[in-house]
Image (cartoon, rainbow, N blue to C red):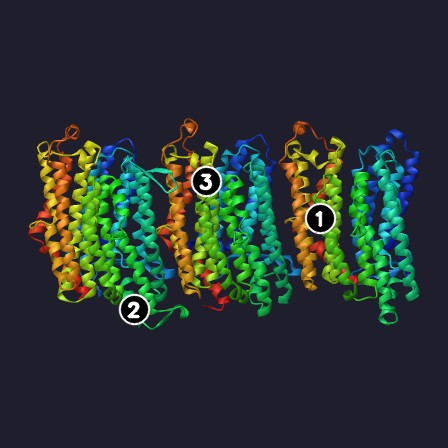
Amino acid sequence: MQFLQFLQEWPLLSIVTFLPAVAGMLILLIPGDRRETIYKAALATGALVFLISLLVYLGFDVDGGRYQFIEQYNWLPQLGISWYVAVDGISAPLVLLTGIVMFTGVIISQRIEERPREFFGFLFILATGVFGVFVALDMFALFFFYEIAVFPMYLLIAIWGWKQTREYAAMKLTMYLFIGSVIALIGGLAMYFASGLGTFDMVALEGANFTREFQILWFPFVFIGFAVLGGIFPFHNWSPDGHVAAPTAVSMFHAGVLMKLGAFAALRVGIMLLPEGAKFHLPWMIFLTLVNVVYGAYIAMVQTDFKYVIGFSSVSHMGLVVMGFASLTPAGYIGAGVQMVSHGIMTALFFAVVGMIYDQTHTREIAKLGGMAQKMPFVMVAFVIGGLVSMGMPGLSGFVAEFPIFMGVWMSDKPWIAIVAAISIVITAAYIIRLIRRVFFGEFPAEFEGHVHDVRPSEKFALGLLALVLVLIGIFPGIMVPMVEAGVEHVFTLLGGM
Amino acid sequence: MGANYLAILPEISLAVLAALLILIDLRLKPERKHILPGLTAGGLLLVLVATLLFARPAAGAGESIWGGMLRHDLAAYIFRIIFLFGAAATAILTQGWKTVERRGEFYVLLVLSTLGMTLMAASADLIMLFLAIETASIPLYVMAGFMTSDDKSTEAGVKYLLFGAATSAVMLYGFSLLYGFAGTTDLYELSAAAAAGDLPVLGLAGVLVLALAGFGFKVAVVPFHFWAPDVYEGAPTPVTAFLSTASKAAGFAVILRFLLAAYPLEVANWGGLVAVMAVVSMTVGNAAALAQKNIKRLLAYSSIAHAGYILMGIAAGTVLGATGVVYYLAVYLVTNMAAFAVVIIFFNVVGSDDIASYAGLSRRHQGLAFAMLVAFLSLAGVPPLGGFFAKILVFAAAVEANLVWLAIAGVLNAILGLYYYLMVLKVIYLDRSEDESKPLPVRRSHMAVLVVCLVLVLVLGTVLGPLYDWSTIAAGGLF
Amino acid sequence: MNQTIWLTLILFLPALAAILLALMPRQDKTLVRWTALIASLIPLALTLFVWFAFKDAPANAAGYKFEEQYTWYAAINSSYHVGLDGLSLTMVLLTTLLTPLAILASFSVEKNVNAYMALFLFLETGMLGVFMSLDLLVFFVFWEIGLVPMYFLISQWGSEKGEKQLWGGMKVSSRTYASFKFMIYTMGGSLGLLLAIQLLGVVNQTFDLPTIVTQWNALSNSDVLLGGFTTVGIAKAVAFWAFVIAFAIKVPVWPFHTWLPDAHTEAPTAGSMILAGVLLKLGAYGFLRFVLPLYPEQSSQYAGVLAGLATAAIVFGALSAYAQKDFKRLVAYSSVNHMGFVMLGIAAAARAAGTLDANIAMNGAVLQMFNHGLSAAGMFFLVGVIYERLHTRDLDAFGGFFPRVPVYGGILIFTSMASLGLPGLNGFVSEFLVVRGAWAIFPFFTALSMIGLLFTGAYVLKGIGKTLHGPLNEEGAHHLSEINARELWVITPLMVLMLWLGVLPGWLLSVINNAMQVLFG
């Protein structure tokens, strides 16, 4: 929006990156017994961060430069490391996504009884890591924040997670993600030295002209290393376990934002810096994503645990994101960019709903649930909207995202992949409908009578906000797509314009 | 090669401090002896400040002083600061350690060992080097076995002594061969002799292996690591802290200078050997650490693994590698010191080093738990803590030197490390215990050490510039 | 371009009203009902306005009037493009007409009225969108959107009785089964459509229908597409079948019809009215608007298959209807039967596009769509009336009701006759036109379908006979009461139109014919 462009003069990105961590540290200093104060402080932080991320989004000028809100300060100039942040058309929506998920995640976490101070402290450090990755234009900073985003996850899941599996899941998740990131890190260092530029500045590295052999050698390390966090097959196994074991807000953050982190970093470091490698390897990697998409959906369909269904659906949907990348067509990338946001919001909504139901019923067995719509109609409506997004129902953001991805695949060198991948749409429809029906409709189990109530107004607000975004993007793609398109355009100047 | 007194100011002042401590200890009434740790720490800090202010060498390759016995350069300077800081922190941490607290000789030994280390860092001559190593080591043998009533401590002292003596002998044998080949004991002239091409390569390589035995013992790398777990476990924990930080740094200071600055063989000739040692060391250390139930043993094995990471920087044999080594050692000092501080504080109250006894710590004392979290995550190499950047530097050095396989072995090991660090943190944060509500008093002085270390861990992980500059200049001076 | 806003108004007013209804207080059900009714009458009024202004409205090059076009999804060259020709106008009129009637018919719904009415109005937007869209992507959006409210209408407000055993041995209620089947069938069918639309979009770089029709047909069959993946000829054939299957499921064409009896039977009365009245027309509309213009060659090539399937639908639909014991199922199968005629007309037109016979058949098909909309809605409503009183639809539980409910009986007979195709009523006109047109093109299938018409008579008479005549079924009659005023308000407009179109079909036919001339002339 034109009138908001003065915002670009402000160091909003630095603020939005560091604010959560600083606030988290301050929250850690509040005496532990003052729960109300802790929650209010967290909520205020969440709201503020959301607001700033919104300003970043609105202040982004679609017709402006590739990178906007640029800030650059020396960090370690001897090694060419700088605090160099900016957003482009792909990352600006992701910043907004993070803001939304963080804000709603905090609202949903009001019910946290156990050590809320540490919970919000760790959650906010995680948020700082996420923002840092999305805005970093310096590869060192990107890795720096990437790992900051990963490790709090361990504690968040292990301490506040679901008792049955939390230790196992937390460790599995951490191990997978760290292996992925350090492997990618080696690739990043190799790029640093091979470029001969002596800088981690990714804008400079984009023009480094790595040899084709170098790119072909290193692309898989970097891309897969990051894509592990994006849930790429066969390294997706950590994700459903992690999602399920995590407490609600963390699942929201995890599936909503963190998985995007993997895909985004794979794009920014993998594809954008090693375009020749991308062109060489992505055409076969598209098969992996196909497995993600179809197999993930199938596995989701046969789950009996509410949360596992959602967990595997994320695998399926994130597969579409990477499939968009692998299509190597602008449409695919536009779709992938929108899908990251759409899936982020949608899955945050899902996990919020799962959490609300679990908090009251203490079960996630689909078979034991039922009739929830009678007690929490608003939750049902929100979940249905999310479910329809998941099915790729037109008029909602999922369609806006998935349609171009499929178009992109049509335009790639293997159009038949689109046909196979489309099977997932029906499978998704099947399990989403089943979920809606079994959980929200039908008989209300007598055992829950009396202790299942409607959710709090604040929680309704959170769900409403998430659902609203899904609907808005679906009806008016123009509020997001042109921005993503501008970002994708640049990716394709690097990929040699196709 | 003049008589540069300022250049050996730290050594002089340490010697004076040791003498003063002996005198004070003699004059001090038994009930006042608890001031000894503070006094020692204060003295060491004074030396530290004096060193910082007056003993700074000019940037560059440095110069040989005192008849070529010592080298006055930035590398020596930084290592001295590291040792002094480590020794001061150790002295403070001995407060409240029953068997040690009131024993003046302990502190004298500490200061003397530190003196030996500072000399190790600066030695430019084979004879001097050996003397320095022994000066540093012999007090440590005594310190490790200081709790004479404790079998484990006694065992630690003896074991350390035997291992140390054996490896010293081997090393000395190597030194003598070297002298035989080159006809000089001056490290810097050795390389000149090599440049003339009249030293047998095979012989030099053999000597290197012998010397590495001695150095490897000091820094506890595989296969010279067997003493470490038992000694770490048995010795008084502050001594363990000192062993694993300052003493290790001293060993690396020697390795750096000996291999990079002085040794008359190209990196290509010994880089592979060191790289293999690095991989084996980190793998063995990490794998063994996985199974540990005692926190000190765990840290012992972890320190073996860290020695492996640091060796990566040396195996690279580049300025960046050496920079990484220096940076890593500085970070490792503050990080491990913080971890041991927690262990000591905890032991002082609870009387146990079992990892299981740490259950519920996060509920019992949030600050202490958080300190452990920060320290362990830094050890694991998680940003924004110092360990992250230190690891990046050594990995980068490996990649730069085309040792990608080494870097990959390193990162995979880092994952292994992360696993057992997280397991400890899990116990601290997740497990419950009946003692949760009991108080856990912490001495102010201990807390101060902890806070300083943690702040440094964070600072070294975020404000990268100053130490990196120093490290680079120091590393550059070696070449 | 001369943009008007009439279509947008008609299209989105129901959706806005739906949102309003969802937010209204739940206590006052009467208020909710009347709000919904009034909200649905506004689009009707607007449609009537458009209807009368249609003749003189300026048309664009492709013959569409009241056109509107705004940027929607610029990244993939899709725009919000709506417009009307005679075909879509007829369908829009049918939709806006049936929706208020259906809402009026659902005044007896007690459960969750807000949500029910909101879904209904939302459904209206979905259906209208399909008829108005001139952009393939936007069309698909509305095509799919309509599924959601219908799914919930069936699964939440459907008949409460009945169980169905699944292959897992698990038992679910019939409405659950039916709604699930409806959703998955239609979504599965749409999958090919979705992929084919993507293919078209990729090839043409736009989703704008008029543009695509021109560009796509200009391609030579041997041109290579998608970087050598396929040729235009293959792509067209594949895409043709993808479109056909999607629409055939919706129509439904035999053998894709099995979802329909389940869905119809389980849906609430008004749901069945809309389902049979409008939703089935979406499929037929798809054939006329997309399949024939986009794939004239393939259409002509495979028209025989379509005609065969249409005949099968006519014959088997009628036979199946005759075999039913459930009154609503009977009516449901009659839809299969009647929609068969629509398909037959379309098939005939596809084979011989441009000829007079084809034109007649097509006019008949479109008129049949409208007529079936009236009569099927009427029939389902009348079934619903009796079901509401007796809570059963079993024909064996009925019998001899005529004396007890003479008005209802009269209406039922009248509507059944319209459905049967009695001359003088609307069904006759359209079926005659179809048969007249198709005769010259597919004599064999047409002859067969005439035999099917015989069975049509049989099952309609069976329905009437079992309900109204014979010995009085005391048990059933116990709860029976005469049709009430509200219900009369629902059925009367339908009856008026049935009679009117039976006697004077010209006003509607001229609109349809004009459209057909432009489309296929």
Residue marked by disc 2: C215
- The residues tagged by marks 3 and 1 sit, at their Cα atoms, a distance apart of 39 Å
Q: Is residue A40 left or right of residue B280?
A: left
Identified at 73% across, 59% down, the residue is B321
Residue type indicated by callout 1 = Asn
Residue C43 can be seen, yes or no: no
Q: Is residue C490 left or right of residue B72?
A: left
> Residue C157's x, y, as percent?
28, 37
Chain to which mark 2 belongs = C
Three-letter amino acid code at disc 2?
Gln
Front: mark 2 or 3: 3
Q: Which residue is mark 3?
A: A306
Tell which residue pokes out farthest to the top in this image: A450
Figure check: B103 above or below C341: above
Marked residue chain, label 3: A
Instruction: Please tell me whether mark 3 sits on a helix, a strand or a loop.
Output: helix
Is label 2 on the same chain as label 3? no
**A204 sits left or right of A334 in the view:** right
Q: Nearer the viewer, residue A110 or C358?
A: C358
